[in-house]
Amino acid sequence: MASISSSQDVIIVGSGVIGLTTACTLQRRLPNVRSITVVASEFPSPSPMIADSPRYSQALPISADYASMWAGAHYRPIPHLPASHPRYGSLTSQQQGFQSQLANEYCLATHTARIMKHLARATPEAGIEIMPGIEYLETPPPENIALKSGDVYAGDDDHFRVYTSAEMEALNKRDAHDGTGQIKWACEYETYVVNVHIYCAWLLQQFLQGGGKTAQKHLNSIGEALQAVPEAACPIIVNCSGTGLWDDPKIKVIRGQTVLVRNQYHSTITRQCADGTWSFLIPRPLGGGTIVGGTKQVSDSETCGRPKERQTLLENAVKYFPDFVSAPKDFDVVQDNVGRRPWREGGMRIEMDELKQDGVKLPVVHAYGAGGRGYELSWGAAEQVCELVGRYSRLQSRL
């Protein structure tokens, strides 16, 4: 990649996991840039697990729109049908578009997984841990059914294994007295989980130690970022604002409610029920408890936790994962987590654009709309942003 001009500045809008990962990646890949500044209304906060700490009591409340602070977070792959698959030609154009989206996300996710696993081994203090991932599906799609043990599912060397019929029969026999649905497909593999408060704080620290800058300001539009960094010269704006701060009709907000408990589980496990609901457990590394989830409510604007939903989530966890706790009362609840995930129909937007500001055209690279997959796509998305910034730099050098 060509080096960006040393007289040029980069302004990154957004301090979620996409924004912070992009900041660190640009810093590493574009060492000659004059400055990189992250502009956001909120920055990483301490974990609620240390609520009795003075550091936590002095922290400002985090809004539901700062979705990265409310995430699980784990890597759960989503299989896709490649264009070479015999069934691909029988799909509608809309279905093919969705499979293309999944294929792109798979590339971003596997790239991210390689880096996350490296960080887990080399820098455990970053708050990432490698652990088993388990899935129980009551209505598995054809893409899952076609998989077999030994296939690549979550990336290279993921030790992917499909449960045998005898194993699923034993699981269903265990659950029969609870009136639960029948598991039709199950698997396990190696994946990673993230303690989001520790990890995002670690990313921010790496960025600041590398000479990066921050500016705290609530923005109503991308153009307002220039007011937060008035000294910026010939800036390139990287839009990692989640919802985009852009006129994009494809953006929707998905409300997610989970429960953080102090009880520590040993694997990240997901159950998909026939009625479309999900139940999952996501342990947080370094003694961060476990996330019990979760809901996916499109266009729901409620930011407070709903007690009835909390009770349902805890009851489902007891029902589907009986080796965790025996009854809902056995959970040591820390808090309800409610995040408004910025989801974009058709997938995350990563592309070059321009902003007209006071008669001047400014380059903008968009990277927003990841929904609930921000952590899973973060490093892959950041690499694509670098390519776009570099492409713009090469174009400008020819003019």
Image: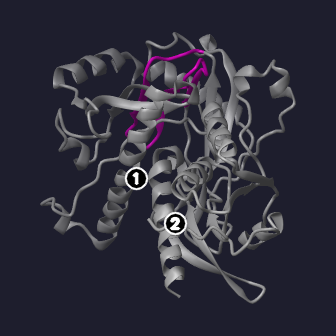
Q: Element under label 2?
A: loop
Vertical position of residue 105 compared to residue 144: above or below: below
Q: Which residues are magenta?
A: 263-292
Q: Which one is nearer the viewer's eye here, 240 or 123?
A: 123
Q: Element under label 1?
A: helix
Looking at the image, how many numbered discs can be counted on the residues? 2
The numbered disc on residue 108 is 1
Residue at the spot x=43%, y=31% of the render?
Answer: 192
Vertical position of residue 159 compared to residue 367: above or below: above
Q: Tell me the amino acid under the disc marked 1.
A: Leu
Q: Which residue is mark 2?
A: 3
Can you tell which quarter of the image residue 200 is in? Answer: top right
- Tell me the crowding category of disc 2: few under 14, some 14 to 19, or many 20 or more residues within 10 angstroms, Cα based: some
The numbered disc on residue 308 is none
Q: Tell me the amino acid under the disc marked 2.
A: Ser
Query: Horizontal and vertical percent for residue 290?
Result: 56, 23
Q: Which one is nearer the viewer's eye here, 309 or 256?
A: 256
Q: Which one is nearer the viewer's eye here, 153 or 380?
A: 380
Query: Horizontal and vertical percent for residue 62?
Result: 77, 41
Asked if the stretch drawn in magenta spans residue 181, the answer is: no
Can you tell which quarter of the image residue 4 is in? Answer: bottom right
Can you tell which quarter of the image residue 190 is in? Answer: top left
